[in-house]
Image (spheres, rainbow, N blue to C red):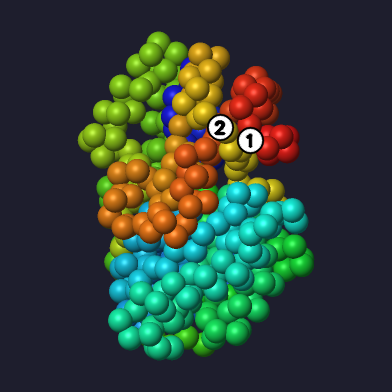
Amino acid sequence: MRHYYLGLAANYSRRQRLKHTFAIGRKVDCDRLTRILTKRYQGEKVILTKNGRSALTLALMANFDKGDKIIVNAFTCYAVYEAIKAAGLEPVFADINKEDLNFGCLGADSESACPSDTLRAALAKSLCSAEHPDSESAPKGIIVQNTLGNPTDIEAIEKFAAEYNIKIIEDLAHCAGRKYKDGREMGTVGAATILSFGKDKSIDTVSGGALILRHPYKNPIEAPSKMPKISDHLRARFYPMFGALVRTLSYVHLGGPLMRGLIKIHFVEKSADNKLDIKRKISKFEAKLAAEQFKSLKDTPLREFCLVKNRNTVLKELKEAGYYFDGFWYERPVSPERYYKKTHFPEKDCPVAVEVSEKIINLPTYYSEKQLEKAREIIKKYSEAKNEVE
Ligand SMILES: *Cc1c(COP(=O)(O)O)cnc(C)c1O
């Protein structure tokens, strides 16, 4: 059994592991990454950050004023909620569909609304709940995340945004390198684009992030000026090494205890705990690795998912078959569980997000296609819709 240890690092060869650990980053690497991002996303201004949530906070601060409301996917990561709050804004959660986990409903035979209807419902709700319902309290922005790399209906969202004078912010944590159905590349549509280079994201250097401001923005923002903390830097560098050690020891059942110990002494950090800090720069070696990964970005979904009827039974069977499935995206509408309560998530308004969070299983990225064959068979038995595990 292989123990949990996430993201690209889990699939590194020994050579790649050494390369990650001993990569030397220089200022020219940051400049190079900035150039790549400027060109690819037609950036007016590009800022490299400590992580994705810091980039998102800066994107929101640049484009909105304190107290503004922002429409956000009801099935997302706590990092997004954290950034909205840190920028002094209020999230308005809009429910998702079960097919692509983005806003609204897609299925031709489904009786529910199209994406813009879902967004309109969220908008109406946010106006009703305001003390003085007027246009001042209407949402000013929308974050589009293309969950797990699945393209959202961007044209419907653009129409809605134009109608209500709402700015689009694109979050590429899951979908760098992907295209919308109309052929445009994700990250080239909105007023600003952010990337996360965290574990298991589409560009994965363990940590880091970037902001691309694409249009004139309202508020001045300061680029990060402080060097990364040494502890954060070393943690990102040695994660692949620790991971390999954990995996090796897991064959004698010591991997789990070791990983828990490493987390306890903060040598390894859970992804959700990566602290938001808009003042810290990216580690230069991360900029170097990210620039390299841009060369080989693939236009494939980030993670496969399927919805199963009885998740606990499925997990039990998977475990018996020797698999280690952990860390669903997402186990709660705003994940992880340990932060969920803080978000005061409106479960009544977003029933699909709640249901999906109870039924979803992701195929882990640390198994090969061959290793996954048996797992697929197990999942298929319980799958809600046949086509989703294919
Ligand atoms: C992970 C993630 C982020 C930000 O990630 P960091 O951990 O701060 O780099 C932003 N948006 C989404 C949808 C994410 O999954």
Task: Tell me how far mark 1 sits from mark 2, CA to CA.
Answer: 6 Å
Camera-side residue of 267 and 142: 142
Residue that extends furthest to the front in the rendered view of this protein = 111
Q: Quadrant of the C terminus?
A: top right
Instruction: State the residue at coordinates (54%, 86%).
Output: 165
Above or below: residue 367 compared with residue 221? above
Label 1 element class:
loop
Write down the residue under mark 1. 384
Q: Which of marks 1 and 2 is nearer the N terminus?
A: 2
- Taking the view exactly as shown, the residue that stands out farthest to the left is 265
Q: Residue at x 31, y 58 (%)?
A: 344
- Residue 153 sits in which quadrant? bottom right
Amino acid type, callout 1: Glu
Disc 1, disc 2: CB below 8 Å?
yes
Residue on which disc 2 sits = 309
Q: How crowded is mark 2: few (under 14 residues within 10 Å), some or many (20 or more)?
A: some
